[in-house]
Amino acid sequence: MILPVRDSVGGAIGFKVYDLVERYLKASKWCYYQSNSEIINILTNYKNTLDQALNNPEVLKIVSEKTQAGSLIKIKLDSMAKGMNIEVTVLGPNGKDVYFNQVTAIESDEIEVIAQTVNNWLDVYEKNIPYDARVVGVLGTQFTIDLGQQAGIYNGYEINVVRPVKKQRHPLLKEIVEWRTMPIATAKLFHVGQSQAQAKILKYERETLVQVDDWILISKNTADVKNNESLEYGVQIRPDDESSSFGKLGFIAGYLNLGSGSARIDNSSSGKEIGGLNIGVGLAAEIWATRNYWAGLDIDKHFGSHSKKEGTFNSDSNSLSFSKFKLKVGYRYLPLGFFYGPQLDGYIGYGSYTYGYDNKVADGITETVYKGIFLGGKGSMPIIKDVRAHLLIEFMLSPGYEETLKIYGEADTVKSFNLEVGGSYQYSPNTAFVGAMEYISNSAEFENSDTVVKHKNLNFKIGASFNY
């Protein structure tokens, strides 16, 4: 990320140099550069003291966190009687680690010459970068790095994952002159995009997992290693091309549910309703056939004791056993091209909702089932680090209606709708805590008897999800 270029002539030169250097970085193959307007929003608060802000490590740390920049490039230009004094500094994400610093004077004030001088120093810095890429996301034994085809890497490349554990600064210049690292794992690239790539662990070097911000060293070694499915410390594994996809991965989640439910019966002359609290458990699972295609299963079981809310009943209470079943397949669109960014799901499946009330024919209550083919959509996006939010909408296409005891007969119109809003917190690479609010509405209309039967659920669920 390039910080605003400061000059001694009120920005007349700095902006033009910034534009040329940014173009160079976007076209280069040694770094992953992406402009981010968030830096403008942050530094607007310091517009009257911008020079001081750009020298404040705390401000620079905030800029790095908000823009998710791995390093910050700071350029300072001082006009001289003849020429320009140029200082190029590369800072770490904490705003104080100096990765690179060079000052040079040139006998020219032409914009192109100044920008080329900066680019030349950045080329020198590139040769001193102690890593080829960084880990930007982890999912079980697979992870994403911020390097892709633009940098000349391809499927099958082997990479080494290392972690910086100690840094040594120059005693006078205060620059970092040496990094000490420890090896974490060896992996193999199996999906390479334009600017990012996915890798699969082949061998753990230590009893520790890959983490975000670990360093990547590219090795083009493609020598065969014996196949071994064990992931224990020190044991090598070599998945073939098929298992290097997302086909053998997915998640399983368990939930505790607490909410309310109701059953309402309306006709032309009266209406009555029974309802109360429900408590239960739920299970959800997905299998990722590829990075985009997946299959899922949802099962819920709730229990409750409902009482009269409105109208007249022969029996003012009833027990409920509610069941939900869904089997679905879908396509996951990744707008940014990688698994850890926003996700948009579209899917189709078969599902059923069973309201297992005790049979009370005189009250018009019996066990009722709504079932059929449904369509759904789900959007998920990261909010802050390790936190995601999601919105889910589903509805059945011409759902069926069944009664254990025939009271109302065949329904003329049946509707089924499901809405869910929730989020998750990624506690570890394989574990997330999840929570959501779910609303379910099912109804059936009977024209012959001028009756409408409605079942509703409002449910809060909390649980944990585990990747496998």
Image (tube, rainbow, N blue to C red):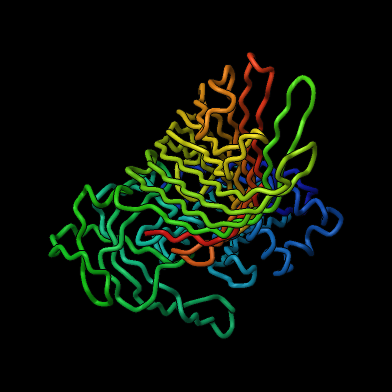
Could one spot residue 222 in this view of the protein?
yes
Q: Nearer the viewer, residue 255 or 337?
A: 255
Residue 89 vs 402, above or below: the answer is below
- The location of residue 331, given as percent across then percent down, is 42, 35
Q: Residue at x 48, y 37 (%)?
A: 352
- 452 on left or right of 26: right
Q: Nearer the viewer, residue 459 or 400?
A: 400
Could one spot residue 68 in this view of the protein?
no
Residue 144 vs 415, above or below: the answer is below
Which residue appears farthest toward the right when viewing the image?
48
Q: Nearer the viewer, residue 420 or 55?
A: 420
Residue 446 vs 342, above or below: the answer is above
- The location of residue 161, given as percent across then percent down, is 36, 67
Q: Nearer the viewer, residue 10 or 151?
A: 151
Residue 454 vs 53, above or below: the answer is above
Place residue 232 in its image quadrant.
Answer: bottom left
- The location of residue 348, given as percent across then percent down, is 44, 31
